[in-house]
Image (spheres, helix red, strand yellow):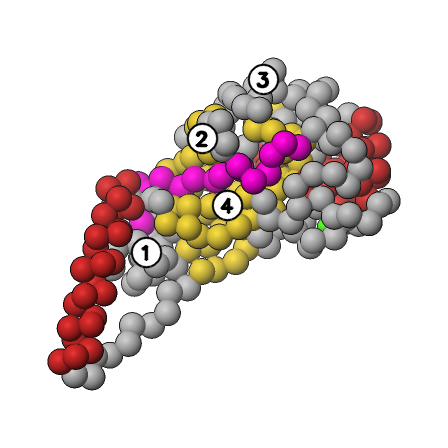
């Protein structure tokens, strides 16, 4: 199970005089200038512009495989985006960036979960979904890890989440399929054990976002294996 974190805006400071009003107006002009690109992608909610947000992101996510083309439900997570008045922001594009997770974390070129798309760039991989009427964007991301050597790979929280271009926070990126082949299979168990028994932490084998690799993570890997939702790996990956 993963935990979530909330990102809360600081309360607005009351103006105390003309100089502070001038300064506030100047700041507002700057804010409007820099917020313009975000507003174009992310409609403001009833409470005003969506940033800085009152939003909720997961502590960690886990990449999954598919069975009969369906993305494994064990990889489902969501991002809730709210405006300054805590109203849900509808129709906002949420992005998960994996650029700093390379090269061991690999994202599938074909994402089958409804509403989820992927863009493969030279130095980044971006997965997107749009918030619904409740301000919630749902994800299941198909991918895995290429565990070339035990303890060698991306560290804690290599993923970054944005809402309409506004940075929300970092997430750990785990992967059940540690050799991007055969879905979840005995090879993945061996690779997970290899990660667990050496001192250098790698995010791919930490499924519950504790920044440790221990039997609780192994139990999640076994659970996903027995559930049968990740019997297949992707046929191609962005990198
Ligand atoms: Ca595998
Ligand atoms: Ca863990």
Q: Earlier in the sequence, mark 2 or mark 4?
A: 2
Look at 25% across and 58% down and name the residue there: 31
* SS type, badge 3: loop
Residue under numbered circle 1: 51
Residue under numbered circle 3: 236
Q: Earlier in the sequence, mark 1 or mark 2?
A: 1
Q: Earlier in the sequence, mark 4 or mark 1?
A: 1
Which of labels 2 and 3 is toward the front?
A: 3
Q: Residue furthest left?
A: 18
Whether residue 170 is in magenta: the answer is no
Q: Are marks 2 and 4 in contact (CB under 8 Å)?
A: no
Look at 77% across and 25% down and name the residue there: 185
Q: Please tell me how crowded label 2 is: few (under 14), some (14-19), or many (20+) other residues with Cα within 10 Å.
A: some
Residue under numbered circle 4: 160
Using the image, tell me which numbered label, if any, was put on residue 116: 2
Q: Earlier in the sequence, mark 3 or mark 1?
A: 1
CB at disc 3 and ligand 1 closer than 8 Å: no
Residue 88 x/y as whole percent = 33, 52
Q: CA distance from mark 2 to mark 3?
A: 17 Å
Q: Please tell me how crowded label 1 is: few (under 14), some (14-19), or many (20+) other residues with Cα within 10 Å.
A: many
Q: Are marks 2 and 3 in contact (CB under 8 Å)?
A: no
Q: Are marks 3 and 1 in contact (CB under 8 Å)?
A: no
Q: Quadrant of residue 26?
A: bottom left
* SS type, badge 4: strand
Q: Residue furthest top?
A: 235
Q: Earlier in the sequence, mark 2 or mark 3?
A: 2
State which region is magenta. 89-104
């Amino acid at each position: 199970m993963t935990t979530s974190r909330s990102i809360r805006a600081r309360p607005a400071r009351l103006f105390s005089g003309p100089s502070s009003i001038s300064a506030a107006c100047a700041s507002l002009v700057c804010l409007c200038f820099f917020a313009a690109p975000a507003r174009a992608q992310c409609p403001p909610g009833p409470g005003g512009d969506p940033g800085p947000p009152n939003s909720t992101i997961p502590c960690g996510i886990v990449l999954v495989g598919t069975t009969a083309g369906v993305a494994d439900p064990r990889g489902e997570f969501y991002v809730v985006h709210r405006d300054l008045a805590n109203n849900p922001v509808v129709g906002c594009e949420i992005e998960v960036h994996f650029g700093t997770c390379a090269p061991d974390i690999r994202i599938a070129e074909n994402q089958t979960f409804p509403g989820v798309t992927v863009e493969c760039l030279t130095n980044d991989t971006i997965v997107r979904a749009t918030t619904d009427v409740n301000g919630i964007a749902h994800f299941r991301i198909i991918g895995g890890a290429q565990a070339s050597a035990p303890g060698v790979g991306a560290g804690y929280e290599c993923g970054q989440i944005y809402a309409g271009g506004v940075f929300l926070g970092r997430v750990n990126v785990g992967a059940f399929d540690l050799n991007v082949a055969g879905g979840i299979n005995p090879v993945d168990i061996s690779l997970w054990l290899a990660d667990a028994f050496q001192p250098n932490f790698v995010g791919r084998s930490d499924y519950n976002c504790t920044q440790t690799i221990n039997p609780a993570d192994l139990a999640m890997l076994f659970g996903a294996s027995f559930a049968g939702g990740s019997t297949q790996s992707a046929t191609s990956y962005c990198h």
